[in-house]
Image (cartoon, grey):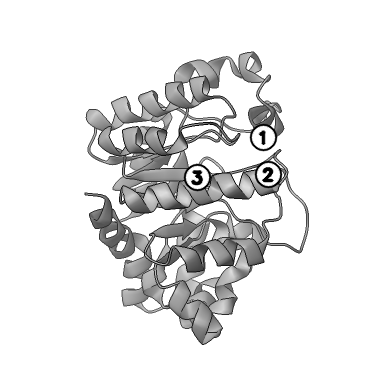
Amino acid sequence: MLIDSHIHIFPEIVKNRRQNYSEDDNFRFLYENPSSKIISYDDSLLYMEHDHVDKIWALGFSWKSEKMTDIHNNYIRECSKSDERIIPFASIPSKPFKNAESYIADIKFSGFKGIGEISFYTEIFSEEQWTYIEEIFSSCLKYSLILIMHVNEPVGHYYTGKYVTDFGRLTGLIQKYPDLKIVLSHWGGGIFIYELMPEIRQAFKNVYYDTAASPYLYDQSIYKYASDITGSDKILFGTDYPLLGTGRYLEGMKKSGLTAESINNICSKNAEKLLKVSG
């Protein structure tokens, strides 16, 4: 089985009329350029068929407004109702707002498995922002939701969508909520290396990492090194489709020297295990 735990789908109206949504800073930042691909549910079905993907974790987008977040969440929820292969994840506005906990409670009781990918592309990480992020952490733990968070590597080349997350602040939050099931996208920006420190390994016992964008950032040895540090049971296969399909990821894993068991863990078993926590 192959589960892609990181794919973004959009309502058709956003895909077909992207120019109508450019007032949102985050959306404009990533998708104003027509060459930036946007896909709908129907497109994801073609991808699954072509790349032999059995299930996808359907992620939305970090809109600033509640209105657009609601529209996007409703779309993903409706898609998942008619197709059990679509595992629904809800978004939450990137701009802090009141009653975030009740919003997250509604997400839980609407059938979503988690929240993500949380991203702050055009936001400044102020104290208000970190307070908001902590509220998201606390609420996801309270309602047994998986939390997927966008984290980039703090060094290396720039690309659209890259921003630096304070590893110290992030680690502090993880240490405060050690029972929260968290997926740090894009290998957590490399933060996994600190699991070589015993106290971080203990605090990060429920932290997972996805492989999204790996071929653009690392050579294929990343799979083996990360697996050696964290264990292959903490890595999730994710493509960030439509950024990339499955081919380069699967090829990289095989060439990296991972065992068949480790590849199976990454490609399906870990995602299935994680889903059990959100009922």
Callout 1 amino acid: Leu
| In this view, 46 is above or below 198 | above
Callout 2 amino acid: Gly
Q: Earlier in the sequence, mark 1 or mark 2?
A: 1
10 Å neighbourhood of mark 1: few (<14), some, or many (≥20)?
some
Q: Secondary structure at mark 3?
A: strand
Locate residue 171, reporting x and y percent: 57, 67
- Say which residue label 2 marks: 161
Disc 1/disc 3 C-alpha distance (Å)? 14 Å
Residue 155 in the figure: left or right of residue 193: right
Say which residue appears at 46% left-offset and 74% top-offset: 203
Q: Quadrant of residue 215?
A: bottom right
Q: Secondary structure at mark 2?
A: loop
- Say which residue label 1 marks: 30
Q: Earlier in the sequence, mark 1 or mark 3?
A: 1
**Which numbered circle lies on residue 135?**
none
- Marks 2 and 1: in contact by CB < 8 Å? yes
- Relative to the observer, which residue lies in front, 159 or 278? 278
Say which residue appears at 40% left-offset and 47% top-offset: 139
Residue 111 visible: no
10 Å neighbourhood of mark 2: few (<14), some, or many (≥20)?
some
Q: Quadrant of residue 155?
A: bottom right
Between marks 3 and 2 in the image, the one whose residue lies nearer the viewer: 3
Between marks 1 and 3 in the image, the one whose residue lies nearer the viewer: 3
- Say which residue label 3 marks: 117
Say which residue appears at 37% left-offset and 45% top-offset: 114
Locate residue 173, reporting x and y percent: 53, 61
- Marks 3 and 1: in contact by CB < 8 Å? no
Locate residue 25, reporting x and y percent: 69, 28
Q: How many marks?
A: 3
